[in-house]
Image: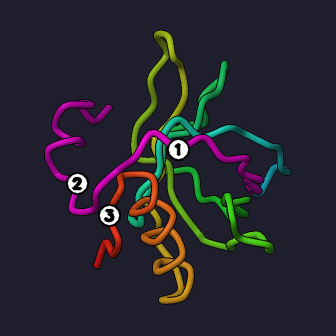
Amino acid sequence: MADEQDFHEKRRHPRAPIGVIVRAETKDGGRHYYSKNLSSGGMFLLAEEPLPEETKLNLELFLPLVSTPVRIKGEVVWQKRQEPSGFAIKFTEISDGARKLIRWVVGRYLGQEDES
């Protein structure tokens, strides 16, 4: 299992503690989660039973101030079983438009005009 601190040190995108509803679909079905944080490169989802590492996901993010869900593909890169339990997702397929929307939301949360 990847070490959480190593993962944090590898981040290239600013991350903000933004809670959004996320619909996650795997080959076994789908369910809704709530995010603990978000960046344009990935997110952490809260879950009592974290998904296994390397699980591939189709995601729909319901971002604040955005009228339609943002669709992204991702992969579980690590999980945490202590409180708060959940799993980290790295975005593997994301459109330029989706990445810009997430940057805009994160930038507004962090008090930045533009998070390019």
Residue 49 on the magenta span: no
Give the amino acid at mark 2: Arg
Picture coordinates of residue 93 (x, y %)? 51, 78
Work out whether mark 1 precedes mark 3 in sequence or the reverse, and give the earlier one. 1
Q: Which residues are magenta?
A: 1-26
Q: Name the residue that disc number 1 marks.
A: 18
Query: Which mark, residue 49?
Result: none
Kindly identify the residue that appears in the image at 36 percent across and 56 percent down.
Answer: 111
Give the amino acid at mark 1: Ile
Examine the image and state in which quarter residue 65 appears: bottom right
Quadrant location of the N terminus in the rendered image: top left
Quadrant location of the C terminus in the rendered image: bottom left
Kindly identify the residue that appears in the image at 81 percent across and 49 percent down.
Answer: 28
Give the amino acid at mark 3: Gln
Against 68, residue 60 (above or below) is above
Secondary structure of the residue carrying tag 3 is loop
Residue placed furthest toward the bottom: 96
Mark nearest the camera among 1 and 2 is: 1
Q: CA distance from mark 1 to mark 3?
A: 15 Å
Picture coordinates of residue 112 (x, y %)? 32, 63
Q: Name the residue that disc number 3 marks.
A: 112
Q: Name the residue that disc number 2 marks.
A: 11
Mark nearest the camera among 2 and 3 is: 3
